[in-house]
Image: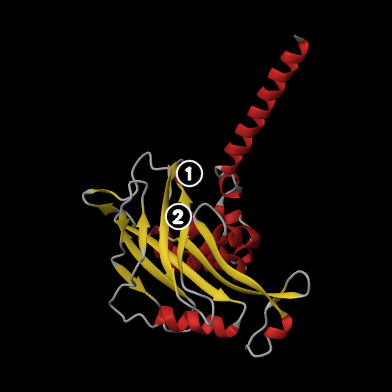
Amino acid sequence: MRENTRMVLGLAMVGAVTILVAVAARGDGFWAKKDWKQWTEEDTKKLLENSPWARPYNIGRSVVSAALPSRSGAAQRGAAGEDVEEIYYYVQLRSALPVREALVRQEQLKHKYDKMMPDEKQKFDAENEELLGHDYDKEILVHVVYGSNIRDYEMSLATYWQGIPEGTLPLNVFLITPRGDHVGPVRYVSPKNGEHEFELVFPRSFNGEPTIREGDKWFRFEFPHPQIADLPQERGLVDFHTDQMMYNGRLAY
């Protein structure tokens, strides 16, 4: 009897720990514990690269070092004397306020905002007011940063994404909902100024209903990754989980 009791208590404790871990994983991160103006450089990097509002997508492989001299650039050193070729994407929901706050905080840290004189802070705040206060009631803005540790691969990526004609939309790009809706973008912007990034604007309403509805547990961003050298093209899928995306008491996306 005592053994059974201990077993029940043990299972209850395991269950409690599991619940606590699950709650912690839902997003009680630094963004819930301190004001964004107190975020560190490490905090902003994490929020923009691997957080509920910014997800990484990586493509990589290990190759023997002897295969690399014919390529420009340098690969990361991996295990067992191998090098790692990597292509990466960071998919950010820039219509989500915490992402925009992280961007402004990065600029604050870069320009030593905390040590500015009051008039300098006022000027800085005015210059960033549009970014923080922009109205995204009708749009979902997805911003994608891409690159590679192999220079030739990075240039090929830029050629592909910057080569999409202005005023047109890339094919096979969607927000996918739990209902199977494939919501396409209404605008695509890829700067030609050397920045390896692009933006897609999606509607917040689809077929007369919100694109992301109350009760949706997730949504997915789909995009085409092109063939780069001998690395084949593939269907990129990045998931966002709405139960982790609460910010200041409301769902932020």
Instruction: Say if mark 1 contacts mark 2, CB within 8 Å.
Output: yes
Q: Place residue 174 in its image quadrant.
A: bottom left
Point out residue 77 in the picture as x, y percentages from the top left corner.
73, 74
Point out residue 83 in the picture as x, y percentages from the top left corner.
71, 76
Point out residue 82 in the picture as x, y percentages from the top left corner.
73, 75
Give the residue at the far top of this rendering: 1
Q: Amino acid at mark 2?
A: Leu
Q: Place residue 10 in its image quadrant.
A: top right
Point out residue 31 in the picture as x, y percentages from the top left corner.
57, 49
Give the residue at the far left of this rendering: 208
Which residue occupies the foreground of this view, 250 or 244? 244
Evaluate whether residue 253 shows in this view.
no
Question: Residue tagged by mark 2?
Answer: 97
Residue ID at (48%, 44%): 248
Evaluate whether residue 229 shows in this view.
yes
Q: Quadrant of the N terminus?
A: top right
Residue 248 appears left or right of 106: left
